[in-house]
Amino acid sequence: MPQSYPVNYLRHMMELQNLIGGEMTNPKGGAWLDNIEPATGHVFSRIPRSNAADVEAAVQAARTAFPAWSATPFEERAASLRRWGALIAEHSEALIAAESQDNGKPVSLAGAVDIPRAQKNLEFFAGAIEHFASEAHIPGGAEFIHYTHRKPIGVVGCISPWNLPLYLFTWKIAPALAAGNCVVAKPSEVTPVTAWMLSKWAAEAGFPAGVFNVVHGLGHEAGQALVEHPHVKAISFTGGTQTGAHIARTTAGIFKKLSLELGGKNPAIVFADCDVDKAVSTTIRSSFANQGQICLCSSRILIEDSLYDTFRDALVAKAKRIAPGDPSDPNTKMGALVSAPHRDKVLAYIESAKVQGASVLCGGDVASAPNDRCEAGYFVQPTILEGLGPACSINQEEIFGPVISLQRFSTEAEAIKLANDSDYGLAATIWTQDAAKAHRVATQVESGIAWINCWLVRDLRTPFGGVKSSGIGREGGFEALRFFTEPQSVCIPTH
Ligand code: NAD
């Protein structure tokens, strides 16, 4: 371990534990996984390598807790979520440091986005459950009333990825708990620390033992056991498209309720009549924020012919000024990629782009270490490619790193065709000052989300999710509460 450690980073080797039935527990099989700090390549904690026996214990604890929790007044469930949110605020410095250390993201990003949003998720769904209502249908004559009774489902599984660890973890568990379900959650084995910290405060927030359980471990072991478990009635999953497809196949015959938030290959469509300065600076952010590891990041930049050279040159000039730095430094804007295998995958895509004839306008390689501490970290330069056709793998497959590819178009129809030339359909960004054109394009682009002249602006009440290979179902607002409840249609005569 390096001698000097940034303020608030974990200095001593930590051993994380599962939360099962209200107890922090070691893995039943006695096996552990190393957890590596991406900025240094050093092991800084160990996490339980849980197996089916741990998942079984967690599911049984959740089943036992379910009757009382589902009968708990929604005001009390909401109050527990709010107390948990307050605990996040109270411990925010420690959480920001842990998220940065675990993921490689800059503390500035974890402090501005990840941790405040995790708190907001808990508070938001506390409020959402207080306003959630179901429908009643009263036909003419009012001889019968039909109403929809929305019941909690039971034990639900929440499986989350590494890119926005606590942010996406809370985005799932909050609506699940608010709606009266008991949860078995499996955070990513790559970034488990903040979920573990949150789990330690569950009792203090007011969640009875067994209502909220966390099982750490590998996807194909702990995750698979959770997905297969017959008493887990729903799975809310965010992660890669291949994993999502595997989960869909696994659960097909047992009819589990599924929400799948998967990968993306998001287009940014830049028309010549856009506000160029704003489009350039936002596209830099949408391409390279979190080292390009946000499912909503732009990766295919489609630029109208007449603006192409100007836009490209401005984008490249700005990208060249971004130097990956030590994530613990408050001035760092770009940190380390999450792991060595992921860095290698991103570099392999860049090499393949070169072989396929791409011009590398900037970046294209590992970035030099910002300091001695980070000598063995996983840093990659922001990379801009051009000259590749729409069918090439760089423009079709999700790279999930700081790599974008530029393409030209000459008409609105061609822009839409290029944007839709993808198996994915998560988020599109459209840059134009012509409101009618913006609307026409937004509604023809095959994506769950379309941002016009902005990016990553979220209102938590709006539906969130993708089409095509980007997923099934929607999260956010009442959509999430609908997912985590089972509607029953009840009919009663009025006399
Ligand atoms: P991943 O699919 O490898 O893992 C996600 C989670 O699934 C992890 O907790 C993992 O342990 C678990 N898992 C893996 N195999 C499993 C199995 N067989 N059964 C059950 N669980 C299993 O994804 P990742 O690499 O952690 O995350 C990156 C991916 O997530 C990217 O593709 C990105 O686009 C996607 N993502 C999507 C969204 C969205 O909202 N659409 C948001 C963030 C990330």
Image (cartoon, rainbow, N blue to C red):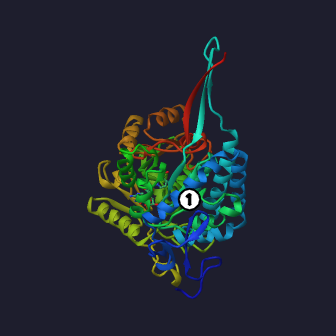
Q: Nearer the viewer, residue 423 or 196?
A: 196
Which image quarter is the C terminus in? top right
Q: Quadrant of ligand 1?
A: bottom left
Q: Residue furthest bottom?
A: 3
Residue located at (36% from left, 50% from top): 250
Quarter of the figure with residue 52: bottom left
Please state the horizontal and vertical placement of residue 55, each as a whole percent of the image.
47, 61
Camera sees residue 38: no
The count of marks equals 1
Please state the horizontal and vertical placement of residue 406, each as a whole percent of the image.
39, 52
Please state the horizontal and vertical placement of residue 404, each as a whole percent of the image.
42, 57
Q: Nearer the viewer, residue 233 or 471?
A: 233
Q: Characterize the local packing of mark 1: few (<14), some (14-19) or many (20 or more) Cα atoms within 10 angstroms.
A: many
Residue located at (42% from left, 59% from top): 225
Vertical comparison of 345 with 254: above or below: below
Q: Please give the residue where the numbered disc 1 appears in the rendered image.
A: 61
Quarter of the figure with residue 368: bottom left
Three-letter amino acid code of the residue under disc 1: Ala
Vertical comparison of 152 with 12: above or below: above
Locate residue 494 relative to residue 161 in the image: left or right: right
Please state the horizontal and vertical placement of residue 379, each as a whole percent of the image.
46, 72
Quarter of the figure with residue 227: bottom left
Identify the secondary structure beneath mark 1: helix
Camera sees residue 273: yes
Q: Nearer the viewer, residue 46 or 321?
A: 46
